[in-house]
Each structure stands twice: as structure tokens, then as C-alpha cells.
Amino acid sequence: MQETKMQPGLEELFSEAETIIEKLEQPGIDLEEAFAAYEQGMKVIKACNDRIDEVEKKMQILTADGTVVPFDQE
């Protein structure tokens, strides 16, 4: 049986990004720690963008005449 890894939701990703930003804003953070936090932050931002892209692909708009069109073609 194959395990599926649950992807974190956008709220969790935004919270993680906020935590990373707070860490980077702390006075006295050393350079190596800052680079590691920055790298992790960039991964979180990419995950956010990927998740938003997935949602946009799934969104559809129902027009006034009852036709369903993709979100980006309104």
C-alpha cells in the first residue's frame, strides 16, 4: 500500500512563512541561520504559489447565460 503525504493548506503555509519572517527580523540572527531561514522561506513561497495555481486551474465561472468558463478566460 502506498502512503500519500498530506500537503499543508494555504493557511498553514502562510503561518509558516510568517514564522520564518519573524525569525529573520530578530536582532542578532547569525548569517548561516539567516540563509537557512531564507532558503526555507523560498520553499514555502513556492509551495504557496503551486497551491494557488492548483486552485486557479480548478476554478470555473458560471456566466449569466449559464455557460461555464475557466476562471482566467472570463
Image: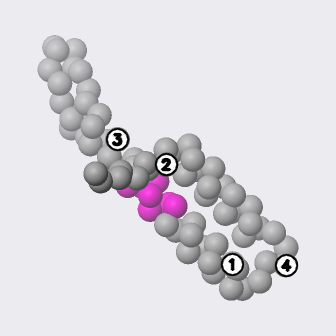
Q: Residue furthest bottom?
A: 31
Q: In this picture, is 9 found above or below 43? A: above
How many marks can you see?
4
Give the residue displayed 61% in from the left and 57% down from the top. 17
Which quadrant holds the C terminus? top left
Check disc 4 and give the amino acid type: Gly
User: Alpha-carbon neighbours of circle 1 within 10 Å: few (<14), some, or many (≥20)?
Assistant: some
Q: Residue 30 in magenta? A: no
Instruction: Determine the CA span between mark 1 and mark 3.
Output: 31 Å
Q: Where does label 2 land, which residue?
A: 8
The vertical placement of 37 against 21, above or below, is: below
Residue at horizontal 57 percent and vertical 47 percent from the top: 12
Q: Earlier in the sequence, mark 4 or mark 1?
A: 4
Image quadrant in which you'd find residue 68: top left
Q: Is residue 35 left or right of residue 26?
A: left
Please say if 35 is above or below 17: below
Q: Determine whether, in the image, residue 23 is placed left or right of residue 10.
A: right
Determine the CA span between mark 4 and mark 1: 10 Å
Residue type at mark 3 is: Val
Distance Cα–Cα, label 1 vs label 2: 24 Å
Residue, disc 3:
55
Which element is circle 4 on?
loop
Residue extending farthest to the top is 65
- Classify mark 1: helix, strand or loop: helix
Asked which secondary structure carries label 2, the reply is loop
Disc on res. 28: 4
Characterize the magenta stretch by its predominant secondary structure: helix
- State the extent of the magenta-drawn residues as a range: 44-50
- Indicate the quadrant where residue 21 lies: bottom right
